[in-house]
Image (cartoon, grey):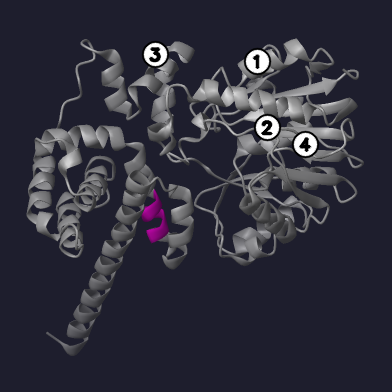
């Protein structure tokens, strides 16, 4: 073998070893996040935000996919693991269980890594984890069995709800609700969409430049543009936005789902608007409203979460919106602002988050059957407080990132029955952009299985007179 050949061989070996080490490290971080989410009640998106900057883009995508995919498919994964291990999962050491969960997700749903490599990496991680090293042999045996066997789903003809719950990895009570609300076929489409990756959407800050100017800057800094959205400021990326980039630091864009952007455009504040965003944290909609209205408008962002308001203030500063003021307030008990003094009010109320399970898959395992009704009572209180701020002729948008009827139509029906001074605006200013998303009474209703948008409900109302 020539010296050049030996040198090339050593270089290839070093590159392979480096890739292996990075692959193990990315999977180690993924299983740590999964374990914190499942065992400690942490939130996956926050942990990913903390850990991903240390990785290269390709490894960021892998970590994100393993974390969100494992949590989304947890019901299906745990069903299989109970069959494969022959024991209740509660008796398995948590670190060992997290290793098997993330590995089984890769075996069943990722096809770029050979099965033997997934198993070998899982065993390597077990031996390097103090709380799982004694279970390395057990983990190896279970996962090797998984490479040879396919676990059958519960028979559909025996129990359709249980079959669908395992097939699409949703709690049985949630399956029952989806079927009751949308029918079996649509419920299956929705659950399938819940398990897919959400699109990477950003909102261009058109206060910083034209659409073409900002897109040129983004592309020159490595952003991969897939397509535009329904409005000029909406852009869907082919990969995750680069938060550690100069365009982000310079306030050229803000990550924000398209459905969320549509809600702000429904309010459509004008240049002389006085706007109240009544549940503003973390600040995405407040800053969008500031961009839409322009620098002469006044935006008041209210929230009871002080950390969320700090984030909102930081986003406003980064984007250059100096007309956004933050106020700490619990809107469930009232608003410390003069009644009937605002031209535009947005209440994007706290909710179950059923429409955002692509980004927040842990939601499905934490919600309880009574949560939609419980949240609806809270939302109605907040809506009544927010409505008191509206001037005669003022606009009020109520929205939730949920498609539960209790949180949408139920809240609006209860509110309008007691507040005859408000009426639904049948033609929002952005009507032409969204008319295909509106129902017969002009309520916005979106779902991830219909057009790829997060699940939102929103209604624009006008105050016709003082109550």
Label 1: which secondary element: loop
Q: Mark 4 points at which residue?
A: 335
Predominant secondary structure in magenta?
helix
Q: Is residue 344 above or below residue 137?
A: above
Residue at figure coordinates x 79%, y 51% from the top left: 325
Residue at figure coordinates x 54%, y 24% from the top left: 374
| Callout count | 4
**Between marks 3 and 1, how big is the CA–CA gap?**
21 Å
Residue contact between numbered discs 3 and 1, judged by CB atoms under 8 Å: no
Of badges 2 and 1, the one in the foreground is: 2
Q: In which quarter of the image is residue 256?
A: top right
Q: In which quarter of the image is the N terminus?
A: bottom left
Q: In this view, does 229 lie above or below 408?
A: below
- The answer to whether one can see residue 253 in this image is no
Q: Which of 329 and 269 is in front in this view?
A: 329
Q: What is the number of the mark on residue 332? A: 2
**Between marks 4 and 3, how big is the CA–CA gap?**
42 Å
- Magenta stretch bounds: 59-64
> Residue 432 at x, y = what percent?
75, 25
Q: Nearer the viewer, residue 440 or 4?
A: 440
Q: What is the number of the mark on residue 184? A: 3
Rate crowding at label 2 as few (under 14), some (14 to 19) or many (20 or more) other CA atoms within 10 Å. Answer: some
Residue contact between numbered discs 4 and 3, judged by CB atoms under 8 Å: no
Q: Mark 1 points at which residue?
A: 439
């Amino acid at each position: 073998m020539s010296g050049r050949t030996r040198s090339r061989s050593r270089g290839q070996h070093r590159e392979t070893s480096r890739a292996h080490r990075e692959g193990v490290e990315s999977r180690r971080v993924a299983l740590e996040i999964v374990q914190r989410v499942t065992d400690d009640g942490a939130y996956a998106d926050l942990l990913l935000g903390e850990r991903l900057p240390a990785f290269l883009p390709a490894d960021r995508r892998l970590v994100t996919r393993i974390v969100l995919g494992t949590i989304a498919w947890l019901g299906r994964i745990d069903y299989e693991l109970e069959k494969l291990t022959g024991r209740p999962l509660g008796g398995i050491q948590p670190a060992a269980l997290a290793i098997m969960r993330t590995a089984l997700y890769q075996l069943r749903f990722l096809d770029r890594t050979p099965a033997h490599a997934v198993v070998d990496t899982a065993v390597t991680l077990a031996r390097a984890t103090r709380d799982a090293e004694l279970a390395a042999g057990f983990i190896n045996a279970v996962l090797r069995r998984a490479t040879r066997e396919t676990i059958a789903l519960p028979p559909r003809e025996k129990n359709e709800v249980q079959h669908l719950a395992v097939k699409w990895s949703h709690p049985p009570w949630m399956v029952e609700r989806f079927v009751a609300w949308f029918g079996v076929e649509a419920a299956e489409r929705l659950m399938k969409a819940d398990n897919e990756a959400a699109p990477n959407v950003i909102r261009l800050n058109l206060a910083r430049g034209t659409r073409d100017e900002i897109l040129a800057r983004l592309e020159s800094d490595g952003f991969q543009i897939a397509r535009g959205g329904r409005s000029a400021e909406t852009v869907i990326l082919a990969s995750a936005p680069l938060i550690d980039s100069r365009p982000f630091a310079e306030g050229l864009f803000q990550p924000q789902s398209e459905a969320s952007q549509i809600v702000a455009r429904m309010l459509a504040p004008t240049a002389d608007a006085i706007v109240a965003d009544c549940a503003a944290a973390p600040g995405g909609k407040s800053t969008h409203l500031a961009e839409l209205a322009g620098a002469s408008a006044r935006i008041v962002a209210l929230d009871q979460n002080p950390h969320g308001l700090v984030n909102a203030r930081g986003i406003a500063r980064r984007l250059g919106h100096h007309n956004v003021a933050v106020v700490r307030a619990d809107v469930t008990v009232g608003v410390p602002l003069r009644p009937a003094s605002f031209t535009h009010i947005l209440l994007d109320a706290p909710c179950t988050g059923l429409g955002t399970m692509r980004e927040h898959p842990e939601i499905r395992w934490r919600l309880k059957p009574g949560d939609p009704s419980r949240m609806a009572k809270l939302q109605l209180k907040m809506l009544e407080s927010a409505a008191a701020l509206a001037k005669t002729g003022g606009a009020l948008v109520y929205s939730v990132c949920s498609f539960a009827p209790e949180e949408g139509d139920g809240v609006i029906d209860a509110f309008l029955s007691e507040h005859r001074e408000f009426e639904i605006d049948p033609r929002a200013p952005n009507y032409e952009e969204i008319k295909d998303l509106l129902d017969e009474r002009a309520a916005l209703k979106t779902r991830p299985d219909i057009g790829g948008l997060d699940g939102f409900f929103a209604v624009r109302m006008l105050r016709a007179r003082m109550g």
